[in-house]
Image: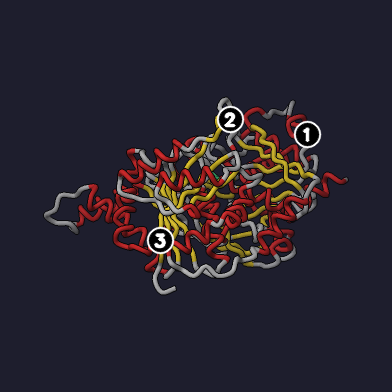
Amino acid sequence: MAETKYIFVTGGVVSSLGKGIISSSIGKLLQARGYNVTIQKFDPYINIDPGTLNPYEHGECYVTVDGMETDLDLGHYERFTDIKTTKANSLTTGRIYKAVIDKERRGDYLGKTIQVVPHITDEIKRNVKLLGKKYNYDFVITEIGGTIGDIESAPYMEAIRQLKWELGKKAVCVHLTYVPYLKAAGEVKTKPTQHSVKELQSVGIQPDILVLRTEMHLGDSIRKKVAAFCNVDFDCVIQSEDMPSIYEVPVGMQDQGLDTAILRKFGEPVGEKPGLGPWRKFLERRNNAKEEVHIGLVGKYDLQDAYKSIRESLYQAGTYNDRKTVLTFINSEKINNENVGEMLAGQDGIVICPGFGQRGIEGKIIAAKYTRTHDIPTFGICLGMQMMVIEFARNVLGYADANSREMDEKTPHNVIDIMEEQKNITNMGGTMRLGAYECVLKQGSRVMDIYGQTLIQERHRHRYEFNNDYQHEYERCGMQCVGKNPESDLVEIVEIPGLKWYIGTQFHPEYQSTVLHPHPLFVDFVKHSIENQEK
Ligand code: GLN
């Protein structure tokens, strides 16, 4: 395709309609037709990135290869399409304003009054076009966070209006709305959709395609009504019914003709319907898996979105082991020495989750001890790995006061310490060890076996590290350092070889697990959890 085309995805009526899943599905369907696609997200909040947000505010923080802390929707983009997102795929109002203010200070606009229109809107437009220009994508899909009508999203809507005007046939707006079912009336209601489209029209945007989220199947008469009231072609009113899994959505959208509607709007040839073979095979395997594997997530955030990528990685790994993964959240704040057996009972494997700060860490340490001494497959991720290391120091090396400097600055046995380059950092935002780093795996280790290679790259998000002063002691007593960064010598993976599966990673493997390329560590962990169950 000669010139990049732009797809904007906006949402109306209510939030949480799944714009990220629809954007990912559009990406997937266009990719299946041979197009080169990327997806970006604009979040209308003032934070530069979600790195400083509490997971209760914003769910998980997803990390790109180039070290940007981003919205969890970028995780969906990668899991669905296998594309690698970067800094340019994640923008916030804070970043847009900062770029404009920095330019103003540099004197780039000398003599001018800086305003939302045109300076902020121009910066938004520049960032929309940047990806297309730089990498020559066929399609750039831009998802706008929030809901139409929000004060915060107004500059984005103005930027889309201008881009649609400038780009003409090269821009299409997909608007996602909600069609509620009123039980008492026994009817679905299209009025909120009509109002939402009016709101878009009032800022000068005519949506080209409407995706109606609905719990009930919508008949043609309802779709016709929406088409007539909203100035949208009948075949561009797509319904998105609730699905048993988010991974069914691309197939559902293909059946509803979302991709063909988009192509027609762009004047692109529609061609044959792609088979989505590997994707369908995954779904089939997923749906055929009846037996369960039970995994407990030991963490402190009782919120599905907080460990989104870990959850999805475990679901994918379950499918590739022909099992249905059943996840149970286990609140580490409630775990103590007396109840740990009871709290972890019934789980075939345990994941000790990432995190920051004191809250809930003692419970994680107690859980790590229990699973080590009872030989239950255990996967520690980032803080989870650090807790495995502390537990081992306290109960095997005999340092009862061992800790991480993050939790106890004065600990005499700082088996987890602050990284050298982190010592003088005072700014909290975007300053952790972030993004992909290399790791060399030890010959003969289990992780080398699992990865099937010695040099890997994984993504990071942390400030503290394994203290290498203790390495020999650990190894002598049975916990091996089996993955190291070749430049800094930082320990990236620990394992206890004698146990069924006891591995901790300083990095976050969950960011790399996708539907068609599940992460080998998760697949192997689930495999051993299943074997543990069968004993
Ligand atoms: N709080 C720990 C650190 O900063 C672990 C971070 C994490 O789990 N992502 O090193």
Name the residue rendered at 80%, 52% in the picture. 498
Which class describes the residues within 10 Å of circle 2: few (<14), some (14-19), or many (20+)? Answer: few
Can the viewer see residue 279 in this picture? yes
For this view, does 386 lie left or right of residue 209?
Answer: right
For this view, does 156 lie left or right of residue 431?
Answer: left
Q: Secondary structure at mark 1?
A: loop
Q: Which residue is mark 3?
A: 6
Furthest-right residue in this view: 535
Three-letter amino acid code of the residue under disc 1: Ala
For this view, does 317 lie left or right of residue 215?
Answer: right
Q: Secondary structure at mark 3?
A: strand
* Position of residue 524 measured from the top left corner of the image (x, y, whole percent): 74, 55
Q: Which is more toward the observer, 307 or 132?
A: 132
Residue 186: image tag: 2
Looking at the image, is mark 1 or mark 2 nearer the viewer? 2
Furthest-bottom residue in this view: 2
Which class describes the residues within 10 Å of circle 1: few (<14), some (14-19), or many (20+)? Answer: few
Name the residue rendered at 32%, 54% in the picture. 124
For this view, does 474 lie left or right of residue 238?
Answer: right
Asked if the beta carbon under badge 1 is closer than 8 A to the nearest atom of ligand 1, the reply is no
Residue 446: image tag: none
Instruction: Name which quarter of the figure residue 339 lies in.
Output: top right
Q: Secondary structure at mark 2?
A: loop
Can the viewer see residue 430 in this picture? no
* Position of residue 381 measured from the top left corner of the image (x, y, whole percent): 62, 47
Whether label 2 touches label 3, CB < 8 Å: no
Q: Which residue is mark 1?
A: 345
Q: Earlier in the sequence, mark 1 or mark 2?
A: 2
* Position of residue 307 measured from the top left corner of the image (x, y, whole percent): 59, 43
Q: Which is more toward the observer, 14 or 238?
A: 238
